[in-house]
Amino acid sequence: MGKIEQAIDRAIKRERIRLQESETARQMVAPLVGNIAGMDSAIEIYSHALKQNGIAPGSANISGMQAMVRMLLNTTGNSSSDTMSIATDATPDEDSILSGVNAPRKL
């Protein structure tokens, strides 16, 4: 195989890796910022998602930005809207069948 063919093979391999990294980044940040179009590199995509969520990515590499996005997903994934509500000692709503009924006091 000649030098030109080797150079072409290396370029094709680098492009496939770049495409795979950018697709992984798009899928990872989708819960945070929705679908991303018009950005070609994984670093751009991660950086955009972090900035949209108030985090300055600085000069982190792809692995560092990926870790920051994972931490952000873990913190936003446990928001109160995702968890079930629990019963409290609050007064029932006016239209509730329990409105007007006094709850027994705890001992």
Image (tube, rainbow, N blue to C red):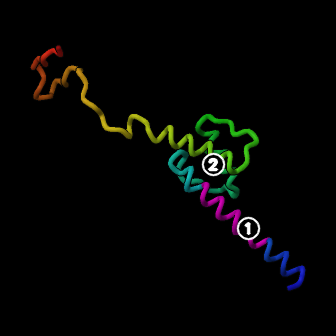
Q: Residue at x 24, y 29 (%)?
A: 87
- Is 96 included in the stretch rendered in magenta? no
Looking at numbered disc 1 in the image, what kind of residue is underneath it? Glu
Q: Which mark is on residue 83?
A: none
The front one of 45 and 38 is: 45
Relative to 95, 83 lies left or right: right
Q: Closer to us: mark 2 or mark 1?
A: 2
Looking at numbered disc 2 in the image, what kind of residue is underneath it? Gln
The magenta-colored residue range is 11-25
- Is 19 included in the stretch rendered in magenta? yes
Q: Residue at x 85, y 85 (%)?
A: 1
**Vertical comparison of 93 with 45: above or below:** above
Relative to 78, 5 lies left or right: right
Which residue was labeled with disc 1? Answer: 15
Quarter of image, res 8:
bottom right
| Distance between the alpha carbons at the discs numbered 2 and 1 | 20 Å
Which residue was labeled with disc 2? Answer: 66
**Residue 34 location in percent, x, y?**
53, 50
**Residue 22 location in percent, x, y?**
65, 59
**Residue 71 location in percent, x, y?**
56, 41
Looking at the image, tell me whether mark 2 or mark 1 is earlier in sequence order. 1
Q: Residue at x 53, y 45 (%)?
A: 32
Q: Residue furthest right?
A: 3
10 Å crowding of disc 2: few (<14), some (14-19), many (20+): many
Element type at mark 1: helix
Element type at mark 2: helix
10 Å crowding of disc 1: few (<14), some (14-19), many (20+): few
**Vertical comparison of 95 with 15: above or below:** above
* Quadrant of the image containing the C terminus: top left
Relative to 25, 61 lies left or right: right
Relative to 59, 34 lies left or right: left
Magenta-colored segment: predominant secondary structure: helix
